[in-house]
Image (tube, rainbow, N blue to C red):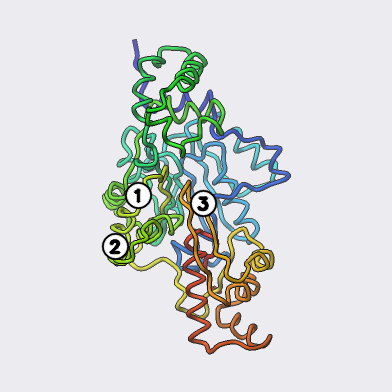
Amino acid sequence: MTVPSPLEDVRAQYEALPYPARDPRDEAVRLITGTPSHILEVNHYLFAGRLNFKRPFRALVAGGGTGDACIMLAQQLVDRRCPGEVVYLDLSTASRTICEARAKARGLRNVQFLTGSLLDLPQMNVGTFDYIDCTGVLHHLPDPEAGMQALASILQPEGGIGVMVYGQYGRTGVYPLQELLRTLAPPSMAMEDRIAMTKRLIRFLPTTNLFRRNPYLNDHITGGDAGLYDLLLHSCDRAYTVPEISRLAGDAGLRVVAFLEPVRYEPSTYMSDPVIARQASSLPLMERAAFAERLAGNLRTHIFYATRAGYDTVARPEDTQAIPVLREMDPKRLAAGLQPGTPLVANLDGFPWRAQLPALAPRIIAEIDGRRSVAEIYTSLGAQGSLPQWEEFYAQFEDLYVKLNGVNHLLLRFRP
């Protein structure tokens, strides 16, 4: 009897249960945006905010699934009139069919569809790419290292990659439950019977069970049967810590330049003791991120950007020509909602994060239109009335930038 290969098992799962579930008719009313691969993020973290959208831009979505990253990126390139191309690649023809229908519903003509494994990319003659998205894929490969190296092999020398992999600490309880289910609901059972047995087990878990005690795991609730299967019955599944991500990228000749959202990877986010927070915050990026993930304990996934370039690819606010851009937010509405003395609040998967914004925050935010630079915003505010000297204004802008960028609301770009 022929034993199915690990990749064949993965393909069979997504043929039967494309994930996440998407209806192409929804494209008429919404564009699903996310992280990684939002074009503002790609520009900010991988190209120092200096992408010229008048030039061709090639992107690969490796393991495109039902198409969220592919459709988002393709639409955003069209919106900027960029002569770009998005190449979609996935093992599952069922998933590809859904993505193709979504692209058709939007009238997108800048997507090329391929069926196959990213492990075969070096032999597929697909050319090279400025940007590669690989979301939720590497942790389902029998050889993730080979997968990362395959992606790096077709990346332009100054290109970058956006990746999502599972986080080890935030998935506490998943892997012991997966082991139980290999006994209770082995792969030899019919898929629907495995799903039914999994639901039964979850319903009767004791209160001491680690999976039951982990409040951050909800794919089996929000994602339907496909989400449940992906979380607990997947045939090939592993999770990563920050140091393991560093090695995975480094072995492929890549360098991690950012984790998202940045505030989740800063020790000071979780540590109220100023001495410990100050000492931990002086560490390099990867050491700070590793420290923070151990402190937080709730990071179910890691989203990161990595590059082959040997220089700093992250846009910085020090240049007064930097143009601040709000990501998916209306500046006037945000500014109006900021009451004096009221902190910015975010729920980081159960951790209540608060940040006190500077006094000028509402006025600065109201001026952010994605076209004016920091210097031009200062000039505009000055024409409206009293304003502190440049040094004080910039100190407040930088404080605002760090806090809003920390929760992925504020990014930077530059004029070509």
Residue 6: x %, y % from top left:
36, 26
State the residue position of label 2: 276
First in sequence: mark 3 or mark 1? Answer: 1
The total of numbered circles placed on residues is: 3
Question: Of the residues shown, which amino acid type is indicated by label 2?
Answer: Ile
**Looking at the image, which residue is at 42% across and 39% down?**
137
Residue 153: x %, y % from top left:
35, 49
**Looking at the image, which residue is at 34% across and 40% down?**
168
Quadrant location of the C terminus?
A: bottom right
Question: Of the residues shown, which amino acid type is indicated by label 3?
Answer: Asn
Quadrant location of the N terminus?
A: top left
Residues at marks 3 and 2, CA–CA distance in whole angstroms: 23 Å
Residue 83: quadrant of the picture? bottom right
Question: In the displayed structure, does residue 20 sit left or right of residue 152?
Answer: right
Badge nearest the viewer, 2 or 1: 2
Residue 98: x %, y % from top left:
61, 34
Residue 324: quadrant of the picture? bottom right
State the residue position of label 3: 347
Secondary structure, mark 2, is helix
Secondary structure, mark 3, is strand
Q: Which mark is drawn over residue 153? A: 1
First in sequence: mark 2 or mark 1? Answer: 1
Q: Is residue 96 visible?
A: no
Pick out the residue farthest to the top.
Answer: 1
Residues at marks 3 and 1, CA–CA distance in whole angstroms: 38 Å
How many residues crowd around disc 1 within 10 Å: few (fewer than 14), some, or many (20 or more)?
Answer: some
Question: Of the residues shown, which amino acid type is indicated by label 1?
Answer: Ser
Q: Is residue 99 visible?
A: yes
Badge nearest the viewer, 3 or 1: 3
Nearer-the-camera pick, 327 or 199: 199
How many residues crowd around disc 3 within 10 Å: few (fewer than 14), some, or many (20 or more)?
Answer: few
